[in-house]
Amino acid sequence: MDPSLAALDHTGTQPRPLIDPFARAITYLRVSVTDRCDFRCVYCMAEHMTFLPKADLLSLEELDRLCSAFIAKGVNKLRLTGGEPLVRRGIMTLVASLSRHLASGTLKELTLTTNGSQLARYADELKAHGVKRINVSLDTLDAEKFRAITRWGDLGKVLAGIDAAQAAGLKVKINAVALRGVNEDEIERLLTWAHGRGMDLTVIEVMPLGDIEEARLDQYLPLSMVRARLSERFTLEDIDYRTGGPARYVRVKETGGRLGFITPMTHNFCESCNRVRITCTGTLYMCLGQEDAADLRAPLRASESNDLLNGAIDEAITRKPKGHDFVIDRRHRAPALARHMSVTGG
Ligand SMILES: C[S@@+](CC[C@H](N)C(=O)[O-])C[C@H]1O[C@@H](n2cnc3c(N)ncnc32)[C@H](O)[C@@H]1O
Ligand code: SF4
């Protein structure tokens, strides 16, 4: 399709690009396609989670329409996440239909963040629909520890999924959450393993999202400590490689691979924020670290034309805040935000 045609919305008018009050262009949309998951990672979910009633969820067609409205407004990078995106029934239908925007050139990248458990099944299809890179979350290579972190997960299945993804020609990046006393002595091993297989590794600080029935402060490990520890063994060279996300990268001289740091707690990563997030019920969050949100499901369902929807998106972007205020509440040990990461998808 002619890209100029693809940019036209349902009414035939050219939708306005998304520029927030701090002159940041919004070009990156993360979409949580389900709040459900086949794991229960200790930093992400409580063991006994209450999930949304299925009737509240946007249908795959509605998710497509919503994503397409953002793409028409200049979003050129789309990440599917969750919960676990690959447990949403029919998810490949959505990937297949969104791939038309890759073909037209309006979307530069369609990608996903996954726990890897279903990758062996879907890797080939993802590749066939134009997905080039994926992020797989993996915090340890020790099967018992993996089970303890994810409560329900099977490491063997995830490793088989990573094998399948690489065999299908997908570029894989590994994301690991740094957890005090859990995997802090294993980051070196993860790094050598990932780089040995040609995969970048990104380490992430635990963020205080959602009640997880465990104490956040006990989990929190500042990445400055991870970096200091790695520097004893590796030479970390700063590079300006960016993927459009919040990670800052170094090159590890000894392995030749890249190592990313996502440090929402120790370093303010908001100044170059180009992202917004939508949940599986069509709520738009302008910032991962703030409660302010806009309901897009009502305007989406109110009319077949996108006028109302586009108006709601424009209005919401005027409310995008300058940054987040994550603080782990030391006195009450309460989450900074009640919402779980599985709602907005990280
Ligand atoms: C919510 S998951 C959704 C996608 C998929 N289920 C997965 O695990 O990759 C996205 C990412 O958020 C991370 N995450 C979840 N809760 C977090 C928290 N409280 N702080 C930091 N990262 C978190 C996960 O480790 C994962 O890399
Ligand atoms: S981090 Fe991902 S895999 Fe783990 S419970 Fe959350 S959504 Fe599921």
Image (spheres, rainbow, N blue to C red):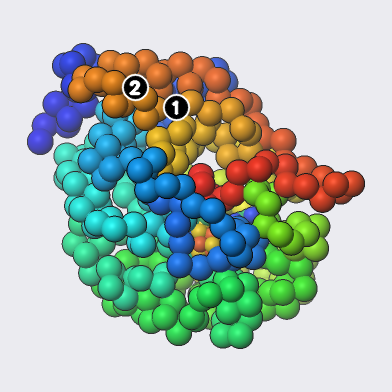
Contact (Cβ within 8 Å) of mark 2 with mark 1? yes
Task: Please give the name of the residue rendered at 74% of the width and 61% of the height, measured from the top-left corner.
Answer: 214
Name the foreground residue: 266 vs 97: 97
Residue 320: % across, % down: 55, 25
The N terminus sits in image quarter: top left
Secondary structure beneath dot 2 equals: helix
Name the foreground residue: 150 vs 255: 150
Residue 94: % across, % down: 24, 49
Residue type of the residue flagged with mark 2: Pro
Q: Which residue is mark 1?
A: 295
Residue type of the residue flagged with mark 1: Asp
Residue 299 sits above or below residue 98 on the image = above
Residue 242 sits above or below residue 227 on the image = above
Q: Which mark is residue 299?
A: 2
Residue 202: % across, % down: 57, 62
Residue 12 sits above or below residue 239 on the image = above
Task: Please give the name of the residue rendered at 42% of the width and 47% of the height, measured from the top-left corner.
Answer: 53
Number of other residues with Cα within 10 Å of mark 2, as a class: few under 14, some 14 to 19, many 20 or more: some
Q: Quadrant of residue 116?
A: bottom left
Name the foreground residue: 106 vs 150: 150
Side (left or right) of 345 relative to 219:
left
